[in-house]
Amino acid sequence: MPQTRERVGVLKKVLIANRGEIAVRIIRTCKEMGIATVAVYSELDRDALHVRLADEAYALGGQSAQESYLNTEAILAAIETSGADAVHPGYGFFSENTDFARAITAKGVTFIGPPPESIEVMGDKISSRIAAEKAGVAGVPGRSETLKSSKEVVTFGNKFGWPVAIKAAFGGGGRGMKVVQGPDEAEAALESAQREALSYFGRDECYVERYLTWPRHIEMQVLADTHGNTLWLGERDCSCQRRHQKLIEESPAPQFPDEVRQAMGAAAVKVSKACGYTNAGTVEFLYQDGEFFFLEMNTRLQVEHPVTELVTGLDLVAWQLKIAAGEPLTFGQDDVQRNGHSIEVRINAEDPSGGRFTPSPGTLSKFSQPSGPGVRLDAGYESGDTVSQYYDNLIAKLVVWADTREHARRRMLRALEETVIEGVATTIPAAEAILAHPDFANGIHSTKWVEERLDLSELSVTPQESGEVAESVLRSVTAEVAGRRYEVKVWLPEAQQSAGNGAGKAAAKRRGSAKSVTTGRTGSVAVPMQGTIVKMMVEVGDAVEEGQTLCVLEAMKMENEVKATMAGTVTQVKVSTGDAVTGGDVVIVIE
């Protein structure tokens, strides 16, 4: 199936309303197709890789996602100023936001994704369940309406059995999802899920469904044009997860009967057609004991789309652009060929020591990338760039292809060994442990396998540090004129070499990785990382037990419980909800 790179006739300039590796990924395909690219950026991303690669870049202002990448008016202003005739939302942020899609199309600008009506049906996980049922595709048992209180969670759990899952109605990727083991956890879990959903997706509606005991997460990539053609391209197994977020994905799924594959593919097409879907999308299922259940539809490009690209030979971003430009698919279902095996590892800025996967923001003082046959790296950072606490912690996606699954597994282990990242802790050691485990090698795992069966208790990771790299006198610096970013070259004194953008590669040393909530002195509870306090659980005078949750810290769009290191009485509370803290800051004192 040849993959063409001809220029799309009606798309001349694409604004990418996103950041990180997905923005870089989209920019590269646009360049190959002769399409001009426009980046947008927050104050913290002023010198990010996606900004450096784009043809033009415009400031959104602000630091947090709410202030920048979720600021509709700022993005619309950038579209107007740049003259972009199309917008690609990437994944996350506004990629599944109906109001944003309609705001784009109302300006006469092409939205590179499905029609707003499809997003409205499938972007809302509740209405997508209803649509799937009408199409004859059964879903996981659950409530097809938003939760108004934790009492509804308790009622559902008592009827269908515990545990249950609370999920964000307008999100995905494990954000805003909490597993509730019993009635006593319902209220806190719902509050946490709503906070995460609002922070990451801009909406806090949630719903509840049954939590399966040992499922596999298998999803189908679909592609649909505006001429009535809808195809499934193949499945991806995304069962290796922690905190309900994927670590490793692969295609094809191991130990997966072909008759189930064909039935699941047909079901994915039915669901897509039921909502009038066009462009690239993913229909997700849970598979257990030979049965599969509709989970949700992601009305966007998935993080793990490269494994499908490597086994099919298709560039999904290129086809997104072509479909958005009105072009028909040039191949049919019988023409789709899947060859070999592909595995993707997400390299996140997280410390997996002891299996805790603690967020680890900081500056990449060194990033040596792997290469060799069958190796692809989609990265959003280079050496010298900073992974901020305000955004997702994905540094890069390492993807390999080989003729067999075992060959791909060994190739991935080799590529991970070649990958060197200094300055922050990463999930690479955990990925190596997963890939080397006999269960993974034999294709015997589930969404709960990492957290319940994989023993990472002895894993200890400390970020390596490196000194400053060689100085350079001629520097590229940035300037903004009317919101547009420009680069100019100037000569600076050597003493100023540590200032400037990420391209300068000046390395900032980073503290060692925190293994847990630290104790500066007896009874002093400190936070293990930079972040924002989103909930306080205690006040002065409260009696607490060792291990009791004292407050909740949000870092890199993940909530982390800060727990008591000893039993006693709270004598000082040094922070309040909404306060920003730095790793090592004492927040509570216990005596």
Image (tube, grey):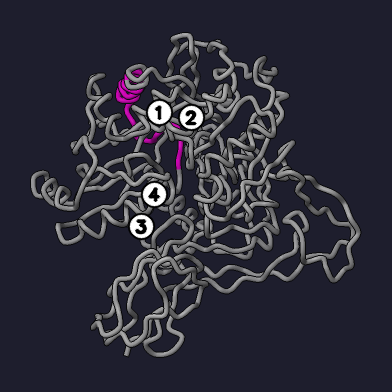
Q: Does residue 313 show up?
A: no
Give the magenta range. Answer: 249-270
User: Disc 1 designates what residue?
Assistant: 119
Q: Earlier in the sequence, mark 1 or mark 4?
A: 1
Q: Residue at x 37, y 71 (%)?
A: 562
Q: Secondary structure at mark 2?
A: helix
Q: Nearer the viewer, residue 327 or 357?
A: 327
Local crowd size for mark 3, using a 10 Å CA cut-off: few (<14), some (14–19), many (≥20): some
Q: Tag on residue 374?
A: none
* In contact (CB < 8 Å): disc 1 and disc 3: no
Q: What is the three-letter code of the residue carrying label 2?
A: Ala
- Residue hosting label 2: 101
Q: Position of residue 118 (x, y in %)?
A: 39, 24
Q: Which mark is residue 198?
A: 4
Residue 232 on image: x %, y %: 42, 21
State how far apart marks 1 and 2 are (Cα).
9 Å
Identified at 75% across, 63% down, the residue is: 506
Disc with the residue nearer the chain's start (1 vs 3): 1
Distance between the Cα atoms at labels 1 and 4?
Answer: 18 Å
The 10 Å Cα crowd at callout 4, few under 14, some 14 to 19, many 20 or more, is: some
Q: Earlier in the sequence, mark 2 or mark 4?
A: 2
Q: What secondary structure is marked by label 4?
A: helix
